[in-house]
Image (cartoon, rainbow, N blue to C red):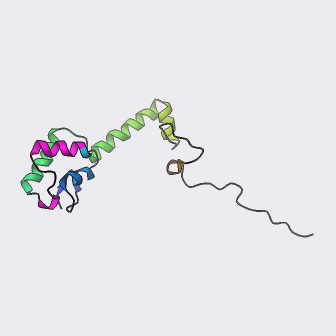
Amino acid sequence: MPRISGIDIPEQKRIVISLAYIRGIGDVQSRKILAEVGIDENVRAKDLTEDEVVKIRSKIDELKIAVEGELRKIVSQNIARLKDIRSFRGLRHAKRLPVRGQRTKTNARTNRGKKATVGGMKRVLQKT
């Protein structure tokens, strides 16, 4: 399995798709890297030579693309900055609510967590 930027990319997929498994590299960026290195997009990742893998690694470094751990660090610093300056977006992040204007009356289960049932218990009347 070729290892690029600390990620084992899938062998059975085309290299253009496999590169997109690296966080920070999407479809467009992947095509750009392969075009500049001179590797066909339709080649399977398992068919790459070690020399081609090294070329891809060096091109990612050369383009100064933030990938994996470095990208996660940048994103977390940006969120921390928003929280520190007490912006609206920062407050939404801190409260674990949707940040980009989505509704919360319904939906937003991912951010808000499991539904809290209200009035789920029925009172049983006893005879006197």
In which quadrant of the rendered image does the N terminus lie?
bottom left
**In this image, 83 relative to 8: left or right?**
right
Q: Nearer the viewer, residue 31 or 115?
A: 31
Q: Nearer the viewer, residue 110 or 14?
A: 14
> What residue is shown at x 48% (from left), y 38% (from top)?
99
**In the image, residue 5 above or below residue 103:** below
Among the 4 quarters of the image, the one containing residue 46: bottom left
**In the image, residue 49 above or below residue 81:** below
Secondary structure mostly seen in magenta is helix
**In this image, 76 relative to 46: left or right?**
right
Is residue 48 found inside the magenta-colored segment of the image?
Answer: no
Q: Residue furthest left?
A: 51
State how many labels appear: 0
**In this image, 124 relative to 61: left or right?**
right
**In this image, 34 relative to 23: left or right?**
left
Can residue 6 be seen from the camera position used here? no
The magenta span reads: 28-47
Q: Give coordinates of residue 38: x percent, y percent.
A: 9, 46
Among the 4 quarters of the image, the one containing residue 123: bottom right
Q: Give coordinates of residue 83: x percent, y percent.
A: 46, 35
> What residue is shown at x 60% (from left), y 44% (from top)?
105
Is residue 32 found inside the magenta-colored segment of the image?
Answer: yes
Can residue 126 be seen from the camera position used here? yes
